[in-house]
Amino acid sequence: MSLYQTQKLLYQLNKDVQMQTSFLADHEAILSDFKLTQEEHDALANKDIGLLYILGVNGQILMHFAAMCGLAWPEYIQAMRDALAVHGNVRAGLYVTTDGKGAV
Amino acid sequence: MSLVFAGVCSHAPGITGRAHMADPDDKETLYSAFDDMREALEASKPDALIVIAAEHFANFFMNNMPAYCIGAADEYEGPIEDPQWLGIERRLIPGNPDLSKRIIAKVMQDVDVAYAEEWKFDHGISVPLHFLTPEYELDIIPVNINCQGPPLSPLHRAWAFGQALRKACDEVPERIAIVATGGISHWPATPDSGKINAAWDKEFLERWCAGDKDALLSYTDEETWQDAGQGGFEIRAFIAISGATIGSQANVHYYRPIPIFAVGCTTGWVDL
């Protein structure tokens, strides 16, 4: 797993409007610059916010990518909850959920 | 000249970005509390405002993560977030590189810090400034304490950093205000978002008001993560204020858990 590379891509994407435009037009061109596993590649290509959360992407990075992908805040939270039900808990990082039962 | 103001406040992006989803009383009382804090800040007539914020991957990443960093740019841009998402327009904010560099040099006498002549503000600074300096006329010096990418600086170093910052403020001729921003307990941007441990917050704020060094530094990161969530690591910002104001009483002026803002919303400042 190359969580570092996944987060680095998203960190750069969050800061760079031009990169966002490129990503939305042709995500493969961006993804090929990073050493990703197939699962990470597919999660990013499919804009699978829930799976990216399970892979361990820090929420402070992921929430901006979710917004970029058009998810409203409640949809973002729900995507992570849905992914917990499908995949089980977060595999790495600080953002492992305690119970997934926040108030909003 | 000296430190003329030292305070703390929340910086959660929901405070501005999800204001329309909040209970009107929650929103109005919090916004009013920010107004009170702005008046107290203005009454101290600062020449510059140091904002100690735990930033969230706007400038710093795990390729080169400083434990402590002070900005030294002549202007800053922010917020880095989508303006519509955050509810704050993107703009330039004035800095003061000469003052920054003098403060950095003095802090370095006691604590090793990184510095940055480029810096983009995220919600950690942009949300507080939206309320506290809405005209954006005051020179800002941003400070980051890494609270996101472990290994994190130990709490006693946050205290020491606050002490060093105070010493630096006292040695420059300008009137300096410091505001530290962050959450207390919160689980931001996770499926637990909106969970708030109000009892833990209350205990922490009692320790903060008393400036109780031993009690403030006794939390382990494991305990904080368990009881106060990922966002709880931002207590480092509060602790830096305590280190900067040893022997002074601090007061919490507003505290209310507001789940849609994902944090126990807080304002407080120190009797200097």
Image: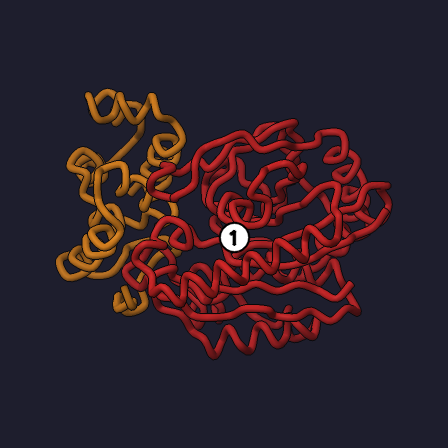
Give residue A40's quadrant in the image: top left
Using the image, name the chain to which the residue with label 1 belongs.
B
Give residue B8's quadrant in the image: bottom right
Position of the C terminus of chain B, as image quadrant, is bottom right
Residue B164 appears left or right of B87: right
**Where does residue A104 sit, x and y in percent of width and height?**
27, 63
Picture residue at 77% right of the left edge, 68% below the top: B248
Q: Quick check: B234 above or below A13?
A: below
Give residue B257's quadrant in the image: bottom left
Q: Residue furthest left?
A: A86
Q: Colour of chain A?
A: orange
**Where does residue B57 sit, x and y in percent of width and height?**
45, 41
**Where does residue B271 sit, x and y in percent of width and height?**
75, 66
Picture residue at 39% right of the left edge, 47% below the top: A60
Residue B102 appears left or right of B80: right
Amino acid type shown at disc 1 = Cys
Q: Nearer the viewer, residue A50 or B222?
A: A50
Q: Which chain is red?
A: B
Picture residue at 47% right of the left edge, 50% below the top: B148
**Where does residue B216 sit, x and y in percent of width and height?**
63, 70
Secondary structure of residue under mark 1: loop
Residue B114 appearing in the image: no
Picture residue at 77% right of the left edge, 44% below the top: B107
Q: Quick check: B99 above or below B37?
A: above
